[in-house]
Image (cartoon, coloured by chain):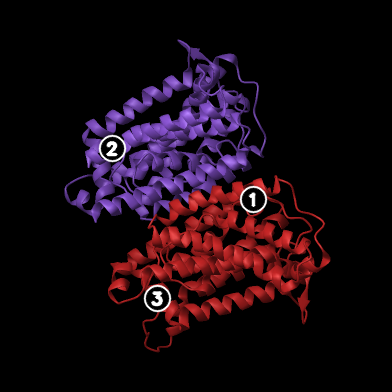
Amino acid sequence: MTSERIPPTRFALWRQYGREMSVGVFLVLLVGYFGTTPGFLRADNLRDILINAAPLVIAACGMTMVIIAGMIDISAGSALAVCAVVAGVTSKSGASLPTVILLPMLTGAVIGAVNGWLVAGVRIPAIIVTLGMMSVLRGGVIWWTRGEWIGNLPPSFSAIGRGEVAGIPTPVLVAIGIVVATALLLARTPLGRHIYAVGGNPLAAARMGIPVRRVLWLVFVMHGALLGLSALVYASRFSVIQSNAGAGFELLAISAVVVGGVNIFGGQGTVWGSAIGGLLLQVISTGLIFRRVSEYWAPSVQGALVLLAVVADALRTRRARR
Amino acid sequence: MKRIIARREAVLVVLLLAEMAAMQSLSPLFLTPDNLIEVVRQSAEIGLIALAMTLVIITAGIDLSVGSIVGLSVMTMGMLWEDARLPLALAVPFALVAGALLGGFNGTLITAVGIPPLIVTLATMAGFRGIALGMSQARSIRNFPEGFLWLGQGYVAGIPVQVWILAVTAVLFHLGLTRTAWGRSVFSIGANEAAARLSGVPVNRVKMQVYMLSGFMSALAAVIYAAHVSVAKPDAGLGFELTAITAVVLGGTAVSGGEGGVLGTLIALLMVGFLRSGLTLARVPSEAQDMMVGLLLIIVVAIDRWSRRAGRE
């Protein structure tokens, strides 16, 4: 658990955030590496990378809580598609801006509540629940849209994803806000400490009087709401919403979290790491395009990166134990 | 424990018969020999994968990479045949070995490094698919000779070839699991890995073999699938992991490991196949079928949980 107090020494910061810092260093090296390609370090390209990373970083925050709590969600990509379509349809119906923002988040929260109830209430393993939900939600969204794209979105909708405040793109601002909020929630509130405790040792957490099932349910609800927000940011950047939106997105979000150093067994990790992990994945995907590497290889690079991160973690913990 | 499993399989058979009756009332074309044989033929490839997946899940593991192993091994076969001009009689064994090696890669990371199977195979699901797409640049390979296509389109004694292959492997898996020391060690690993290790079961070796078997069976399914649809494509097997895991879990194998069997998996596989076939005949769109299969998985596991809890109280 991170709530342990580490005695202040010269290396306290490194001890507490070592993993996050090493991923950060890796990110800088990577930007430097791709930076040798002309055009990569141009301000508008770096800005694009940040904007493109925003939906992933937002979703990774929710996934961080899920994984710290010892759970997993592989229906996230399908849930993203449902929320994106809800956002598009709401916006086309001429609803007000707050409705267009809140309804996808509410949809996500409801999906999360169902997942959470099945996991915490009915006690079905999260992998089975979300595996089933993955095809229920994806099938549902294709059935609903008849596989057609949602186009002719009103300009007020695109303004969400393409707008900017004081020169900073709205998606980036939203992502920063969510990262800070989730980090505060995890580190500074009783609920946050409960999430670490439940993921670290559910039995011990229950003995300590932590309402384990309610905490798990809340984690899924919050994760769902964040997915809704991620879907809104994602969808409002394009002029159409496809019913196959978000295919493979769950893997991206889990990759960001795992690369960022969150322990896959639960109980350890921070949102900062996941945010850097998300940024890292986006830098690699943009960098590969600049290097003219065929996009077909991209999933391999992503898979290899995840394996690299978990193998490094496994070897490090093993050495620490000896 | 054995009685629970037998009861579970009896329930599945009753469900299967009820489902067939319901499908018959939806469409009179359903209960015809041609249609039933066609359903079994369509399920055969995923059935081969689901057999091995049953073992994986009994050891309390999971293999999400099977669909990508299908894609990668089918392209290995296709490119060896088309680009390297190898005869198919050599390219097919190469593909099967490749599948076993890919499974062995998963197994090494799981046993030697100690990473959870879910994370390993989630990563290799992306990784293997990327290699299949990258090395082939997403092209398709066609024009396989007649003799090869027989594997996926031919008949022996009126029964499709792949159904024979599925039947024989299913019997082998069932016997291996229930009648051999190896089978007992698979169960003991899933029930309590630490206890299995202490009682002398070579846990890592058995797990490694199970994941290699999963890769091998995926490659076998890939070869048959290519012969069935007459084309080798790098996106072959997309989503196979979902159907295979659904069949295993529906069939009563516990995801927490230690119990289950291949008979339940096969019955559940037929349930999913008949459901899809009946709904197709009734003109229900395939995306609605996906929804129903997903719902079926969640509902059946939920009922299982509730009945177990009721039984305990």
Foreground label between 3 and 1? 1
Residue at x-position 40% and y-position 76%: A194
Question: What chain is colored red?
Answer: A
Q: Which residue is mark 1?
A: A141
Q: Position of residue B264 (x, y in %)?
A: 35, 35
Q: Residue furthest top?
A: B157
The chain carrying label 1 is: A
Q: Position of residue B9 (x, y in %)?
A: 32, 35
Viewer-nearest residue: B219 or A80: A80
Residue B221 in sight from this viewpoint: no
Crowd tier of the residue under label 2, counting other residues whose Cα lies within 10 Å: few below 14, some 14–19, many 20 or above: few
Residue at x-position 69% and y-position 57%: A85
On screen, residue B264 above or below A245: above
How much space separates mark 2 and mark 1, taking CA atoms? 37 Å
Foreground label between 2 and 1? 2
N-terminal of the two: label 3 or label 1? 1
Q: Which residue is mark 2?
A: B7
Question: What chain is colored purple?
Answer: B
Q: Which residue is mark 3?
A: A194
Element on which disc 2 rests? helix
User: Quarter of the image containing the C terminus of chain B?
Assistant: bottom left
Q: Position of residue A123 (x, y in %)?
A: 37, 58
On screen, residue B64 above or below A233: above
